[in-house]
Image (spheres, rainbow, N blue to C red):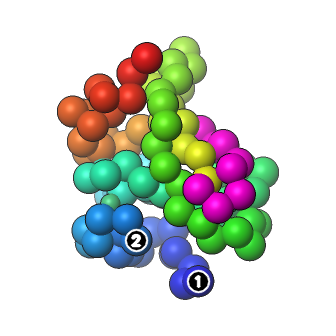
Amino acid sequence: MPFIPRQEPFLCEHCGAKVQPIEHGSCRNHCPLCLWSKHVDDQGPGDRASTCGGLMEPVGVDFRGPKGWMIVHRCVTCGKSITNKCAPDDDQAKIATLHP
Ligand SMILES: [Zn+2]
Ligand SMILES: [Zn+2]
């Protein structure tokens, strides 16, 4: 499995989109078009400690106060759930479909 650099463009392994990094601020770990991610973190965002490498399906959203909306991802390979902050250019219509 290829390593995903934090601030480099990457190809989404779910929809094939070429994903550009966010210019200012936090690292992007999911595709803004289909919202799928990849299981590379173990304990927290950006630690890149997981050896799983499975694709992570967006399964829901969660409101976390000052952090705003978080996307809940579940790994299709191992079943682990990780929440990630939404990026400003995420597809808002897709996020809306994840609301309870
Ligand atoms: Zn995608
Ligand atoms: Zn996994």
- The residue range painted magenta reads 76-84
**Mark 2 C-beta closer than 8 Å to ligand 1:** yes
Q: Residues within 10 Å of mark 2 (few under 14, many from 20)?
A: some
Q: Is residue 7 above or below residue 85?
A: below
Instruction: Judge left or right: residue 18 versus residue 83.
Output: left
Q: Which residue is mark 1?
A: 1
Would you place residue 32 above or below residue 83 in this image? below
90 in the magenta segment: no
Which residue lies at the image location 70% right of the left edge and 69% below the top edge?
52
Q: Tell me if I can see residue 31 in this picture.
A: yes
Q: Nearer the viewer, residue 96 or 70?
A: 96
Tell me the residue at 21%/33% (across/down): 93
Return the x and y of residue 13 as percentages of the image width and height: 40, 71
Q: Amino acid at mark 1?
A: Met
Q: Amino acid at mark 2?
A: Glu
Residue 68 to residue 11: above or below: above
* Residue 9 appears anywhere in the view: no
Q: Name the image quarter holding the N terminus.
A: bottom right
Give the spatial CA distance, label 1 vs label 2: 11 Å
Which label was assigned to residue 13? 2
Q: Residue 18: x and y, percent?
A: 27, 72
Please say if the residues under marks 1 and 2 sit with CB atoms less than 8 Å apart. no
Q: Is residue 69 above or below residue 72?
A: above
Q: Which mark is first along the chain, 2 or 1?
A: 1
The C terminus sits in image quarter: top left
Residue at 52% across, 75% down: 4
